[in-house]
Every structure is written in C-alpha cells, then in structure tokens.
Amino acid sequence: MKSQIGVYICHCGLNIANTVDVEQVREFARILPNVAIARNYTYMCSDPGQALITNDIRDLGLTHVVVASCSPRMHEPTFRATIHKAGLNPYVLEMANIREQCSWVHSDRTLATLKAMDLIASAVAKVALLVPLQEREVKVTQSALVIGGGIAGMTATLDIANAGFQVCLVEKQTHLGGRVAQLDTTFPTQERVADLLAPVLRAITTHPNIRVITNADVEKVDGFIGNFRATIRARPTFVDAMKCDACGKCVDACPVNVPDAFDANLTTRRAIYRAPDARFVIDARACSFVQDRVCRSDPRCAAVCDRNAIDFSQTENLVEINIGAIIVATGAATFDATKKPELGFGTYSNVITSLQFERLAARQELQSVKDVVFVSCVGSRDATTGNTYCSRVCCMVNAKQARRIQEKFPDARVTVFYADVRAFGKGHEEFYDAVRKTGVRYRRGYVSEIFAAGGQTPKRDQKLIVRAEDTLIQKPIEVSADLVVLGIGMTPRAETNEIANVLGLPRSGDGFLLEIHPKLRPVETAVDGVFLAGACQGPKDIVDTIAQARAAASSAFASLCRGQVKIESATARVDEEVCAGCGLCVATCPYGAPALIARTGTARVNQVLCKGCGACEAACPSKAIQVMQCTPRQVLAQIAVLA
C-alpha cells in the first residue's frame, strides 16, 4: 500500500517563522514523494493545530505524519496522542526539528529556509518506512519510596499514603523536617515553623501506611517503572528508644564536643545528643568510643545510663523493598559564605548568615543592635561563585528578618542592600511594601567589602563598615553596622551527585536534578517512575515546594492506582544469531537495559528499561542491535535525501 504522508509545519509564533519562510517550505514539502497534504500553522501544538492533523487523517486517509516544529523532546508525546486519537498508530510519526536545529541557530533567512527543507525531506523519507508498533504495559507494585524527609518528602509521603498506598520514607538525618525545621518563621504570614511542622510530623509518625527509616541512605535501585527494588542502608543510633527515658545523663558524661549543624554551627553538641525530634542518638562520626579515641573500651555514656539504653552492639542494617514509584525530595544546601571572604564571614563574629539568624530568632537569642545591614544575593546571581541563578527566597527572607529586627528593636537602623527585589509570590509584594513602611531602608547596590571600623584587627562584636556601590546614584557608599546578615542562596546538596548516580538521573547545568520539561512535565525525570519534589530540582520557597511535592505525589499514585503503566515501544532489539556477546552494549547503555545471558552467551535488552536512545546500536561492532523506528534502512533513506 502506498504511503499517504501529511506534512505539518509550525510557525511557533515567530520562533520559526521569523527566520524560516514557512510558506516556501510548505510549497516544497507539498511536492515531495508520497506527500498527500502539506500545511503550516501558527502553533501546531495548539488545539486548532492538532485539529488540522486529525481532520486530515480522517478525511484524506493519511498513513504517516511529519510535524516540522520544535524538539521532539518537547512535543512528540503531544503529536503521538494526536494521531492516535485520529486512528493512526502513534509510531508512524516523525518530527523534523526546525526550531532548535534550524531557526534558533541561524540568522540568514535564505539558508535557514533551505536547511528546513532538507530536514523535512529527510523526515519524509524516513517516515515512509516507519512501521506500526504495539503499545505495551507492565504491572505496577502498588507502593512508593520517598527519598528525603523534609517538607517536600513528608508532603508527598502523606498524599500517597492518604490515597491508600504503602510508602517508605527514607531520611539521611536522624530526624525528619529537613531545612525547614531550622527556620523560625515563614513569609509572608510569619507563621511559626514549629506550628507548621507539628501536625505534619504527627501525621507521618502515626499513619498506618507509612514506614519511616531515618539515619539511612538509598544505596542501590534496580528495576524499572512499576517494579523497582531499592536497597536501603540504615545506620545505627546506638540508643534503644524503647528503653531511653530522656534523662540526659549521657549527654553530661560525654567528653566530645562538635559543632551543631542543626544550629548552623552557632553552638556545639555532644556526640550523644537530643535530636530535634526529641530522641537521643549517637553521632558515630563524632563518638570517641565508636572511633576508638577517648572512651576506648569504657563508654562513659553507657556507664551512667541506669536503663541500659546505650547499645553499641547495633550494626548497619540493609533493608530491601519493592516499590512501583520513587519520589526524590533530597532538598538543597545553603551557600558556603566563606567562599566570599570579602564579606567577612568567619572573620567577624557579627557577620552571620540568614540561616544563623533564623536559629538565633528561634532560640530567642537576638541581641540588641543599633545598626543592622542585610546583604542580598550572597552566592546567587553571581558568576564569580558559579551560581548565576536566582535562589528565589533570599529577598523575602531578608525582608522577613529585617522586619523582625525593626519590631524587636524599634530604634535600630536597618539597611538592606539588594540587586533586584524579587517579590514574586502571593502576598510577597504587599509584605515587602509593609516592611519598607516600618522604616527599613532599601539600597540598590553591590557590597564589595566588609571590614572593621578604623582598620582594627578582627575581634568579637566590633563595629563594621559595609562598603558598596549604590547603583542608583552610581556612587560608592559606606554604612556602619553592629550586625551584618548575609542572605545566602541555595546550592545543590553534596549528595545530589550520589543519588543521581544511584537512580540514573541527569543534572542541570547548575547541578540540580533535571526534569524532563520545565513547563509540561516539571516533576518527571528521564527515568520513568522517578519523580522530583522540592529544592532538589532547583531553589524554591515553602509554598512552591509543597505544591511540587503534591504534584509529584499525584504523578506517582496516578500510575500506582492504575495497576499498570505504558512503556516505550520504539526500543532496541538484539539479533542473537549475529550477536558475538562482546558486552559493549552493556557497558554503553546509560539505563542498564542490555544484559549478557549466560546460557546463550549473547545480549538481550530489557524492553522496559530501554529508552530507544540508540547508544547500544552505535556501539555494537557486529551490527546485531537495531532500534525500532531508527533502523539502518530508515537512517540511510534520510541520508540519501541529503546527499
């Protein structure tokens, strides 16, 4: 049967039409072999644009479709669904990328138009050889794993559990709460974080569908969407929670002092300490008995414990679970302000970070001050640190903390240095205006240096000078300060690379985990069945974090509740009669889809894991692997048109 091909050229507004003569391209496509109809439209992905395609398929009996538009990574699922709705197999579609590969990278209209013609001719040659593929489904294990016990992880966990599915929540720290638990209040409502977290923590710990594993890491994940198997390494706390009565004698006896990371290193704690969730735990990295330093064979904490709750016989425990979906909610870190030595953090005790301010406020330890300076964008929007992105929370955190100072110390003079105030959220602009009305001075400028007044050597709580350039009056200025608060931004956690490797997830250029599409699929990843929630995907405030967590949970239980999910059909196939069993495909595949079968000595591809990327086909020296819809015959047909 002769192919009847429809070609549809998208203007993409002016993204394509500004550089490519789409009408000339349409006239060219109309006379290509087997082309029955060629059209162009402003936005082919819009409902009217898709209607053009479906109507032509029904009215003209089209057998294959070419869409010349943006990257297939963005809209191939859209157009597959469109032609499927009209009765065609979703896999008889080919997309010609004339935006990213043509109009966006060329300025010469004539040459760009000619290139677009070549790309479309190539796509038409290939699509005529595409064959229908059968869509497949796999069964789903109806439970989920959430990695990260911050506000994003807890929100996603509760949503899935409330939908009736079992959830395992794994947290690296000894307690739940994440970064949010370190804060005093939220913006713009100024609600106390303790009041926000308490009901969530209570719901998590009492829910029958939730299993919480703290002080643990996800070490390994095998399998595929609907059928993952995770290995979790749970570290011991060396304290039997059932025996411990929280008397605190062990803390008094412990000889080891270490910086308290939960308190932003403002204070110290013992190796055995009371975690934020009120349980007593032992930090194995600091404990002198575990590390064989001070206590040696006679742990002092155990000696004073009347209830024998100290248990150094505890060991690491490997837990294996089967799940159908995974949500990554590992959060973000805060910028290390010592990387900006000109700002004096670590040199002057009265230069603190915004996180340290939160801890001081939470403990009611803010000291009376007369002159306070807040510095925005420390570690954000700064090419010198490599973090050119906006952290999205610093402006409002500065406003919230400036208001706290102004309310607590009405006579204080508060100055905020900013690059641009980004009050983008609901109620943020109103909150910012209210802060300014309290007397807080906002000065647009970049702080270049913070130093001791009078050139003194650094000492505790001395007067400081903040030197900056006021970019509105274009003059250098100096402001004296008793306290300087650095509005530090967010950075990827050190463990982000580790979890990315375990799950096979890509990372964006700034180091955060990468979603498939920022607008259309913001919580999905390149690995089917793995979703992102919260600041692990990029800087977010609490509102956006919770919204994304609930979106990730919805995406996860959408597949769980169906009991089965569709998988990619255009995957790699091995001709075992040709395969030499060299294993190059196994080493090349980023998804772990090929495996050598011991019985036959040849490779076989797990069709569920395979993404059809073609890496194995390119690597195979025997030409034993072919990716469906990208066979040598189809590729050579494309090349022949361009030759």
Image (cartoon, rainbow, N blue to C red):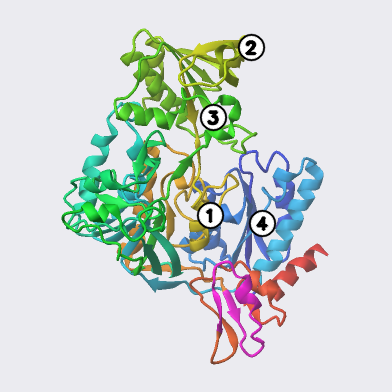
- Find out whether residue 483 is within the magenta segment: no
Dot 3: few (<14), some (14–19), or many (≥20) neighbours within 10 Å? many
The residue pinned by badge 1 equals 497
The residue pinned by badge 2 equals 476
Circle nearer the N terminus (3, 1): 3
Please state which of residues 37 and 455 is positioned toward the viewer in this rendering: 455
Q: Going by the image, does 99 lie left or right of 544?
A: right
Circle nearer the N terminus (4, 2): 4
Q: Are the residues at dot 3 and dot 4 in contact (C-beta closer than 8 Å)? A: no
Question: Which residue shows up at 38% across the image and 64% down it?
Answer: 233
Q: Are the residues at dot 1 and dot 4 in contact (C-beta closer than 8 Å)? A: no
Whole-percent x and y of residue 253?
27, 46
Instruction: Estimate the spatial distance between the alpha carbons at disc 3 and disc 2, rounded to whole Å.
Output: 19 Å
The residue pinned by badge 3 equals 378
Circle nearer the N terminus (3, 2): 3
Which amino acid lies under the numbered mark 1 shown in the image of this protein? Asn
